[in-house]
Image: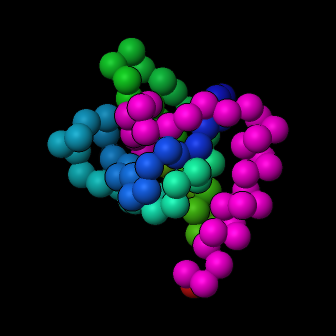
Amino acid sequence: TRYAKTNVKGLNVRKKPSTKASKAFMVNVTGTPVLIKELSDDGWCEITVFDENKNREGFVQMKMLDLIEKSEYFASFGSYFLSLKGRY
């Protein structure tokens, strides 16, 4: 398992590793922590995102993520949840 955070706002997470694949969901907040389940040679990775009290999975291009240390991954949940304040 590798740890990362999103580096763009409005990241489309796909059902398959292709920009032509249908969208599984969108990550709206830059800096959202993600788990990288698998990284392929073509630049796509399978990720898990904790969103709205559930784990969501899909595919994104690695260039949309910044690798981080495990400790930063867990620490980033505090700022991530604060960024959601007022959205719900």
Q: Is residue 51 left or right of residue 78?
A: left
| Residue 3 lies in quadrant | top right
Residue 53 visible at all: yes
Relative depth, front residue between 16 and 63: 63
| Residue 4 lies in quadrant | top right
Image x and y of residue 2, in percent: 64, 29
Give the number of callouts: 0
Quadrant of the rendering where the N terminus is positioned: top right
Residue 40 vertical position relative to residue 32 in the rendered view, above or below: above
Q: Is residue 74 magenta?
A: yes
Residue 48 visible at all: no
Residue placed farthest to the left in the image? 20
Quadrant of the rendering where the C terminus is positioned: bottom right
* Residue sitting at x 46%, y 62%: 28
Relative depth, front residue between 68 and 48: 68
* Residue sitting at x 49%, y 44%: 7
Image x and y of residue 73, in percent: 72, 43
Colour scheme of the rendered structure: rainbow
Image x and y of residue 60, in percent: 39, 39
| Residue 48 lies in quadrant | top right
Q: Is residue 78 magenta?
A: yes
* Residue sitting at x 62%, y 48%: 33
* Residue sitting at x 60%, y 84%: 86
Image x and y of residue 30, in percent: 52, 54
Relative depth, front residue between 52 and 29: 29
Magenta region: 58-87
Q: Is residue 19 left or right of residue 37?
A: left
